[in-house]
Image (cartoon, rainbow, N blue to C red):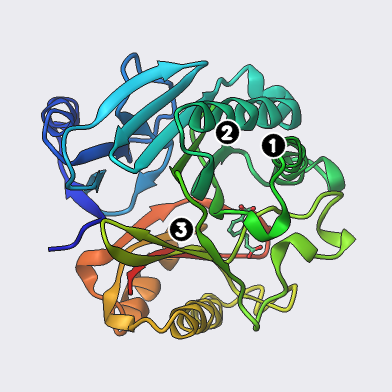
Amino acid sequence: MSIFVQEYISSRAAASDVGELLNQDGVLAVVGYTGDCLEPAAPGYIPSGLSPFGQTALEVIRYPFGRAERGITDRCHWNVIGDLICAATWISPAECLDVEAATEQAYDRILGVAEQLGFAFPFRIWNLLPQINQGAGDQEIYKRFCSGRMRAFTRHGMAAAEYPAASAVGHHADGAVIYLLAAAKPSRNLENPLQMPAYTYPREYGPCSPSFARATRIELGGKDFLFISGTASILGHSTQAPDDIVSQLEVTQANIAQLVAQAGGSGDKLSALRVYLRHPEHLDVARALLERTYAAGHLNFVHADICRQQLLVEIEALVEL
Ligand code: 3EB
């Protein structure tokens, strides 16, 4: 049995299912794909703002080492099982009007709370933002988000070599959520030789480079895992094949394969493949192409904007090594 699992669940009666899941041993948190991104009253459930193309309504993060302890501290919802925390904090629609300051404050909260609880080392972060491509030039939401994130990381003493794996995409809901997995000990970072490290991207991509690693490697429950960041059709720092979904999927898959190979992993151990597609009309071609390589049951297609306007797809994954 796998130790760490991100499992997709199809469901229409999401609300009662969530309560039942959160009462089970080994359920760390449940991520919702219901198109809303509002802070719930109780910890454990993380509505992401994302909406799926298929039947997936929930993603269960399982870590089978007992019952989760949960709480809310400084607007951060936290869930702990043993040596692993999953924490989430929401940014309200009103706060999103100043996304740079709101991101910095949200990161301050979530890094602070994780650290207070004994989990000073985030190794995987998801950033789900509204209207990610809105705003011209340096005013674009994504670029302002990057500035706020970097300021918080710097204040928390995080060096570039310690950045977590991440995804940063745009959903179509109001409000934002940042959620993370963190450990009590450092993970190991991987960069992809086919891609420039994102934290060294040149100035044309914004005043502050994106602060994330291409992948992080960490031991959980006695096994090694590789958490692969949202990966796109970028070589060096340049977007490849701006208008061509098939080429973008191929470049993205090659980037993922490179990371898996570097970690000594095997392609058939890939799971939790979340595929962010900008355009619904690309779903059929993306599914057909990706199912040639990846197991259909591990693929979850969601509708989202990617952080560069010319990117049509971004894919993240988990590998048990
Ligand atoms: C890229 O490779 C594509 O800002 O956290 C992918 C994953 C991307 C994470 C982030 C951005 C982020 O630059 C975009």
Task: Return the x and y of residue 215 as percentages of the image width and height.
Answer: 52, 66
Task: Return the x and y of residue 305 as percentages of the image width and height.
Answer: 56, 51
Q: Secondary structure at mark 1?
A: loop
Question: Which image quadrant for residue 221?
Answer: bottom left
In the picture of the structure, the residue carrying the numbered disc 1 is 156
- Between disc 3 and disc 2, whose residue precedes? 2
Q: CA distance from mark 3 to mark 1?
A: 30 Å
- Between disc 3 and disc 1, whose residue precedes? 1
Instruction: Locate the N terminus by quadrant.
Output: bottom left
Determine whether, in the image, residue 40 is placed left or right of residue 81: right
**Do the residues under discs 2 and 1 have CB atoms within 8 angstroms?**
yes
* Amino acid identity at mark 3: Tyr
Mark 1 crowd level (few <14, some 14–19, many ≥20, 10 Å Cα)? some
Q: Nearer the viewer, residue 52 or 148?
A: 148
Label at residue 276: 3
For the question of whether residue 159 can be seen, the reply is yes
Q: Nearer the viewer, mark 3 or mark 2?
A: 2
Residue at 16% of width from left, 25% of height from top? Answer: 19
Instruction: Locate the C terminus by quadrant.
Output: bottom left
